[in-house]
Image: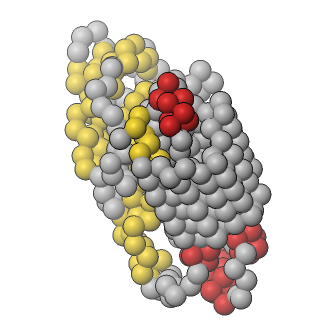
Amino acid sequence: MQLLESHHQCPDCLFMELQFIPKVNNQFELYLNLKHNQQQEEILDGRVKFGLRYSKLLLTLNNLVFIEKAEINSSIITVANNVFSSQLIWDINYLSDGKFLQGNLTKIKLGVLELNSDYYELKAQIVAKKADIFITDIEGLWRHDITPNKHSILERKLAEFIENTQLTPYISQVIFCSKDANFSSTLPHQKQDNLTEKQALELRKIIQSIYLTTKNNFPELAQMAGLNPLIDFAGGDLTGVNLSGLSLSSGNFQAANLRGADLTDIDLSDGNLKYAKLNGADLSGAYLEGVNLENASLQNSSLALSNLIGANLINANLTNTNLQNTSFSNANVKGAIFGNNLGLEDDKKQELILKGAIFK
């Protein structure tokens, strides 16, 4: 196989290599190498560092057959089964004890390929979206004396800019083909300048308008930035934000950092808060019916007077959480960790243990 294309938009953040080891009868073993770290980019008048929490590997085959998928012994990369996709897909996740993908994956066997023709092509892409971007440092783009609400809006707008200019249509792509192949592969990076002047000017304008406004209402600020509070803040840094009393039912805040946030009397029913960091947040009186808090961290937070009927709390951490008059009816607490919980009566504790909760 000859290498037709190797393009990496953020080579420090993610670099992909594929290796082919010949077997017999036109068969090859396919191996993957990945390098993950932080990427530093100069944006406007400042610098930004970011990594990825999650990405997908997409494999497209032309006149090749994947005759065997390898069982991967890794907690970082797993096979994704999608019956509606003609592509082969693998999920790449960061470890729960880290903040984003770092380090190297070396010689991960993906499976065995077989040639069906003398003319063939294999295209591998790694893709990610805004929610997968973890910004580690922001320097020189705005003063840091702004409110937490403003910071959270600008942080996600910056992530959106990175998505549009660095991760679209992919982060990394490699293409292999037969020597005499006549495939017309699309090489979009040769046709467009990712860092467009229009996008940079728009970002600068939004930063200035958010910084100068006297408004601090979260939905109003989001509207100014062209963001939707229900879908654009997954993976975002919402440390210390004030969302008190807002109706954000069915909102997606997966993997968001909501440490120390004021979430009193908020409506997050049927929302997605998987892997969210809610340490020290105040959710007193919150309406959380049907919310997904799987693997969420709620240490030192308050759920006093909150409604968690039918909530998913699988593997959530609720140590040192205030549970005065908290309703857990029909909640799934399997593997959830409790301990030192103000307001939790013994009979309720025993009920939670019977449902699979863990007390430390």
- Residue located 72% across and 60% down the image: 265
Q: Quadrant of residue 176?
A: top left
- Residue located 43% across and 40% down the image: 337
- Quadrant for the N terminus in the image: top left
Residue 113, horizontal then vertical, whole percent: 36, 19
Horizontally, is 140 left or right of 323 in the view?
left
Horizontally, is 80 left or right of 77 in the view?
right
Q: Is residue 226 above or below residue 29?
A: below
Seen from the viewer's position, the closer of residues 145 and 285 is 285
Seen from the viewer's position, the closer of residues 282 and 124 is 282
- Colouring scheme, one of rainbow, by chain, secondary structure, one colour: secondary structure
- Residue located 52% across and 87% down the image: 145
Is residue 168 shown to the viewer in this render? no
Q: Report the residue that reaches farthest toward the top.
A: 25
Residue 238, horizontal then vertical, whole percent: 55, 66
- Quadrant for the C terminus in the image: top left
Q: Quadrant of residue 42?
A: bottom left
Q: Is residue 16 above or below residue 220?
A: above
